[in-house]
Image (cartoon, grey):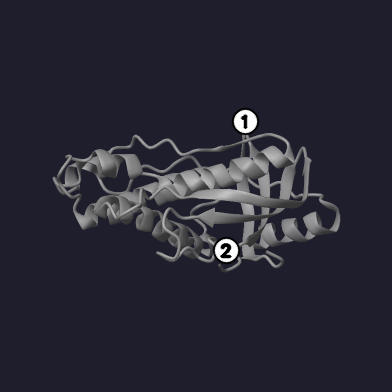
Amino acid sequence: MKIITTAAAALALLTGLAGCSLVPSPTPPPDIAPATPVSALPPECPFVGKNDLTPVRIPIGTPRETIGSVLNAYGAWLNAGSELVTAWSPGTTVPENCVERLAARNAEAYSSTLFTSHSDVAWWEYFASVKVMNQQNLASVRLALPESGGRGKFELLKEIDSSATDSGTFLKFDAVYRPVVAGQGSWEDLDKPTRWYVELVPAGDFLVINYIETKPAAGY
């Protein structure tokens, strides 16, 4: 997975590594409504146009609690829409293009909720990679693959270093993603032990991600 950052985020990470003194970031923009009007959606994908998705957010808490909340929010994003696909016309396969549209809707909802600036082009490639992982989970639900529910989960392996101040929280931990069926799909190496570096800043009663980096973790 590539490093995704802005100039401000990089500065925040460097200061966080030096003394865990984080630089506050701007309040994230409000959620943006889906770009495609409901009336323009194909009739075979009615659920895609519903603005009824409530992303799982990251509440303010202790550093250890925040690690769990970050993994919980990511797990929810990767599984977002599974229930809709499962419940869609029992006995009828959801059209493939609906899965892609649903993953795009989920990416818009989560990126605009969990990150300081989801409109920054520096983040687009990263959001696209998470969207693809969500789409893979939805596709497995759509096809009802053997032993596959499309609902993998993250597991915390070790908390390495973390701190919190009034202006932000810095996390360093190891985690792994457990797909329902191991060895299937491309999970950006998150299905192997991974070292996470995350900097979050306050946004009301929640935290939003200002910087994130993942890389392979050794020793597992």
Q: Position of residue 189 (x, y in %)?
A: 54, 66
Looking at this view, name the residue that lies furthest to the right: 19
Q: Residue at x 81, y 51 (%)?
A: 20
Q: Position of residue 95 (x, y in %)?
A: 19, 53
Q: Is residue 25 left or right of residue 140?
A: right
Q: Is residue 45 left or right of residue 159?
A: left
- Of marks 1 and 2, the one in the foreground: 2
Q: Which amino acid type is marked by label 2?
A: Lys
Q: Is residue 92 left or right of residue 218?
A: left
Q: Nearer the viewer, residue 103 or 49?
A: 103
Q: Which amino acid type is marked by label 1?
A: Asp
Q: Residue at x 66, y 45 (%)?
A: 67
Q: Quadrant of residue 91?
A: top left
Looking at this view, name the residue that lies furthest to the top: 205
Query: Where, quadrant-wise, is the C terminus in this rendering?
Result: bottom right
Question: Under tag 1, what secondary structure?
Answer: loop
Q: Which residue is mark 2?
A: 192
Q: Which residue is mark 1?
A: 205
Number of numbered discs on residues: 2
Question: Under tag 2, what secondary structure?
Answer: loop
Q: Nearer the viewer, residue 45 or 157?
A: 157
Q: Position of residue 41 (x, y in %)?
A: 19, 47
Q: Earlier in the sequence, mark 1 or mark 2?
A: 2
Q: Quadrant of residue 15?
A: bottom right
